Image (spheres, helix red, strand yellow):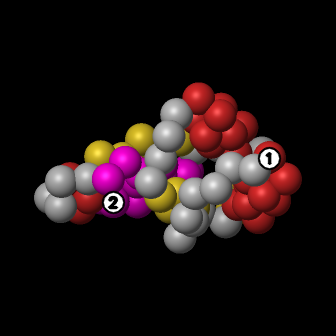
């Protein structure tokens, strides 16, 4: 499973990537809404794990963008 992890806290994202790797999942990590949008427009993901409080925008804003752009991916 390919996962996009949108998390600005380095310690949290590192721990999550390590945990996901033990279950044979790969995760791409981005720290901003803009980077998440760029990744979602250029890559295919099975799941997005989303922090709601991000620099330069909110997780809610990213959800709204996905809906309005027709990006259909489960978000946790």
> Viewed as shown, does residue 26 lie left or right of 72?
left
Q: Which of 41 and 70 is in front in this view?
A: 70
Q: In this view, does 74 lie to the left or right of 22?
A: right
- Mark number, residue 19: none
Which residue: 64% across, 56% down?
72
Image coordinates for residue 19, horizontal then vertical, percent: 23, 61
Q: Nearer the viewer, mark 2 or mark 1?
A: 1
Near-viewer residue (13 or 69): 69
The image quarter in which residue 13 lies: bottom left
Q: Which residue is drawn at 55% across and 64% down?
A: 74
Regarding residue 17, the answer to whether it shows in the image is no
> Furthest residue to the right?
68
Q: Residue at x 68, y 50 (%)?
A: 71
Please state the horizontal and vertical placement of residue 17, each as a whole percent of the image. Answer: 31, 52
Q: Residue at x 84, y 53 (%)?
A: 68
- The image shows residue 5, relative to residue 35, as above or below, that is below
* Magenta stretch, residue numbers: 1-16
x and y, in percent, of residue 32 in the image: 65, 43
Cα separation between marks 2 and 1: 28 Å
Dots 2, 1 in contact, CB < 8 A? no
* Residue reaching furthest to the left: 22
**Label ID, residue 69:** 1
8 is within the stretch colored magenta: yes
Provide residue 56's location: percent of width, then percent of height. 77, 45
Instruction: Give neighbour class at mark 1: few <14, some 14-19, many 20+ (Cα, 10 Å).
Output: few
Q: Is 18 included in the stretch rendered in magenta?
A: no
According to the picture, the residue beneath numbered tag 2 turns out to be 16
Residue 12 visible to the viewer? yes
Task: Give the tally of numbered discs.
Answer: 2
Q: Which numbered disc flags the more N-terminal residue, 2 or 1?
A: 2
Residue farthest toward the bottom in the current orientation of the protein: 76
């Amino acid at each position: 499973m390919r996962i996009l992890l949108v998390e600005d806290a380095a310690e949290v994202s590192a721990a999550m990537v390590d945990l996901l790797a033990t279950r044979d999942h790969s995760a791409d990590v981005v720290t901003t809404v803009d980077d998440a949008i760029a990744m979602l427009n250029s890559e295919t993901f099975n799941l997005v794990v989303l922090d709601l409080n991000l620099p330069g925008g909110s997780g809610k804003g990213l959800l709204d963008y996905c809906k309005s752009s027709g990006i259909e991916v489960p978000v946790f």
